[in-house]
Image (cartoon, rainbow, N blue to C red):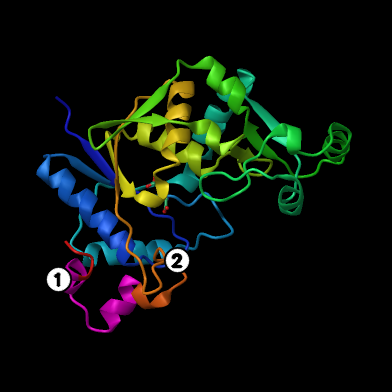
Amino acid sequence: MNPPVFRFAPSPTGHLHLGHALSALTNFAAAKAADGRFLLRIEDIDPTRCKPEFEQSIYEDLAWLGLEWETPVRRQSQHYEDYAAALGKLESEGLLYASYETRADLARLITGRDPDGGPRYSREEGLAPAEARSREARGEPYALRLDMQEALSRISIPLFWNESGAKIAAEPARWGDVVLGRKEMPASYHLAVVLDDALQGVTHIVRGKDLYEATAVHRLLQELLGLPAPAYRHHRLLLDVHDKKLSKRDKSTTLRALRADGWTVSDVRQAIGL
Ligand code: GLU
């Protein structure tokens, strides 16, 4: 039997905070307990938000927490060709289309909401076809979207995922026609995360509850791309004093700020309830 494979997959868009420590330590402990492997993956496909100094601080903070991970670390920005190939497969199967709405267009046109509260895109609510064609002719930027209805017609439904041993019905249609790539970027979070977990042989995905709903999209992509379905567990989120999810924007709970204030690793463990 191959050992189970766990991973922690942060995006270097800010310094890690206590919520990341909970995720990383939970994965590491689960891997240890199961005689499994623990991987670190840097999810840096967004060149405008990801910074080398944040990646460096991820390594420092995780080492300080006492974690050890396999090397080389997979950095998504070095693997665009893998994501482009997956997009190409979906495109050749008639599952993708280009949509030319700007953010402002989406705010004006789209009435439905996805589970994260963002616009739930459907072609009927999008730009009029003539306007889309003229933007295409001008070579304007576009998003490559998954044709959700068509995609669902290609797989056997209902679709499920394994959440801590329970069978959960996945309803990806609640996300509308999700973006899987862009004109200048042959990848998106959903596409890259699903592909990398499969390429790295990840068997157990342990991550925060903020990604629970996205799992429906991930299961659909796994089916469409012929990838195995890992087991999932979405852990509690740490909240700030205003009961909001901790954010990288809030500097006071970053691990490096706490460390500079004299916190020890056991202070961290206690603060996050481990
Ligand atoms: N890169 C994602 C984040 O930092 C996590 C991806 C995942 O665990 O599936 O929020």
Helix, strand or loop at label 2? It is: loop
Name the residue: 62% across, 34% down: 177
Is residue 143 shown above or below 267?
above
Q: Could you say where residue 144 lies in the image, as x and y percent from the top left?
A: 65, 35
Q: Could you say where residue 215 lies in the image, as x and y percent from the top left?
A: 41, 38
Q: Is residue 25 left or right of residue 190?
A: left
Name the residue: 23% across, 49% down: 27
Locate the C terminus by quadrant: bottom left
Q: Is mark 1 within 8 Å of ligand 1?
A: no
Residue 139 showing in the rendered view: yes
Is residue 231 shown above or below 265?
above
Q: Is residue 122 left or right of residue 180?
A: right
Q: Residues within 10 Å of mark 2 (few under 14, many from 20)?
A: many
Give, as a three-letter code, the residue at label 2. Answer: Gly
Q: Nearer the viewer, residue 220 or 67?
A: 220
Q: Which residue is mark 2?
A: 14
Q: Could you say where residue 191 lies in the image, as x and y percent from the top left?
A: 50, 36
Residue 161 forms part of the magenta stretch = no
Q: Which residue is mark 1?
A: 266
Q: Main secondary structure of the magenta part?
A: helix
Name the residue: 20% across, 51% down: 28
Residue 72 showing in the rendered view: no
